[in-house]
Amino acid sequence: MAILRFTLKCVLWSITLGSPIFAGWWLYQDSQSASVSWLTDTVKTGSIEITVPATGTLEPSNYVDVGAQVSGQIKTLYVSEGDVVKKGQLLAEIDATVFETEVKRSRASLLSQKAQRDQLVAQLELAESQLERDRRLNARGAVSDDSLKQSETDIVVQRAKLAATEAELQVDEAALEQDLITLSYSQIYAPMDGTITSVEVRVGQTLNASQSAPTLMTISDLSHMTLRANVSEADIQRLSPDMPVRFSTLGNPNDFFYSSLEKVLPTPLVNNDVVLYQVLIKVDNEAGHLMDGMSTQVFFIEAQAKDVLTIPLAAISERPRGTVAYIPGPESGSRATTPVKIGLKNRTQVEIVSGLDINDSVIVGRENGASSEKSISLTGSSSSRGPMGGRRGF
């Protein structure tokens, strides 16, 4: 019976179209349809979002390179990498023998100037007393005017010497204060709360701070991090301030962190003619799961919809008259279309606004039973992809 039906179809199509080629093509299509079984999926409730992907690196939002302001040998280190420190905590000491000697010298010079000042004060008091005596004697004619004038001149000279000594005394006091400050620089204290993320020196190492301040260690505040993401110039216009951001680390790709976009830096990075813009994202890290230098996969959420009906993108076709979804036909192995209204669409899924209900079946591809090869295209051996990565034709 099947052979008779096959022969009758060939004859009818040959007579109608006047060509055995059309008859053979029709027969091939009929035999293919008989052997096709469709791959189906169901309409589900879920979330869909459109994202801008990027990669990035985590770094502390606030950190300080702790340096030395004096030269000398590292005498003691009180911390190591990974230690948590508080502001004002003693971190290291530099050998202060030279600075202590300078302080002693300045103190001795200051004492000498004070002694000289006291001497000049005594001499001035004596000269003033002598002047008063000469004035009384001069009034009675016992002392000449020249002697009185000399006593008055001695007063002026003594006062000038005392003023000069007072000035030198202030210089010595400033020198002592400076030496005490320099001595205090031999002890390195933490300028902020944080974690020691690196130590650049060792006990016994000699530092030379004559030209620049050598870095001893770095303190970072790891409770607040900055994610520095690199975004392609093709996608940078899609970003906006306060845009939601989701990211994960390479070590734990299924554990997501959420934040928002802070700023886009204006100067690009150009590497092998690839233009990338840096985007800064503030991240709260009170739990301490994130660490300095971690690589991340970042998704800037351009649009999203939650608790909506979704189907695979391969199950729809956008046509000039509207969008249709492919559904199983009434007969076994057949397929049909139904008009649908869609919302958000990404590379894999599409939101169904109307036209389908939850748990409805849709066709996402076909399985060729004759060749035992599965194809996710509904058009045969090849398929064309749309701009969002979906398959457009059947």
Image (cartoon, grey):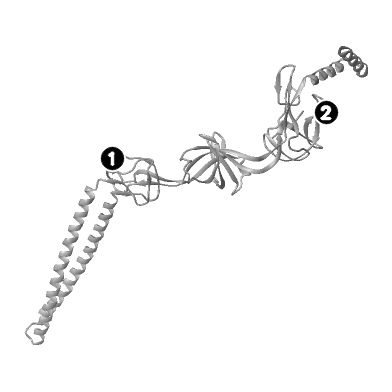
**Residue at figure coordinates x 52%, y 42% from the top left:** 228
Q: Nearer the viewer, residue 135 or 379?
A: 379
Q: Quadrant of residue 384?
A: top right
Q: Quadrant of the C terminus?
A: top right
Could you tell me if the residues under marks 2 and 1 are in contact, i.e. CB atoms within 8 Å?
no
Q: Nearer the viewer, residue 186 or 355?
A: 355
* Res 203 label: 1
* Res 98 label: none
Q: Is residue 141 left or right of residue 358?
A: left
Q: Is residue 10 left or right of residue 380?
A: right
**Residue at figure coordinates x 48%, y 44% from the top left:** 287
Crowdedness near tag 2: few (<14), some (14–19) or many (≥20) residues, C-alpha within 10 Å: few
Element under label 2?
loop
Q: Is residue 137 left or right of residue 376?
A: left
- Residue 248 placed where, x, y %? 54, 38
Q: Is residue 394 above or below residue 68?
A: above
- Residue found at the far front of this picture: 359
Q: Quadrant of the N terminus?
A: top right
Q: Quadrant of residue 4?
A: top right
Marks 2 and 1 sit apart, C-alpha to C-alpha, by: 84 Å
| Residue that mark 2 sits on | 330
Amino acid marked by disc 1: Val
- Residue found at the far right of this picture: 15
- Residue 348 placed where, x, y %? 67, 34
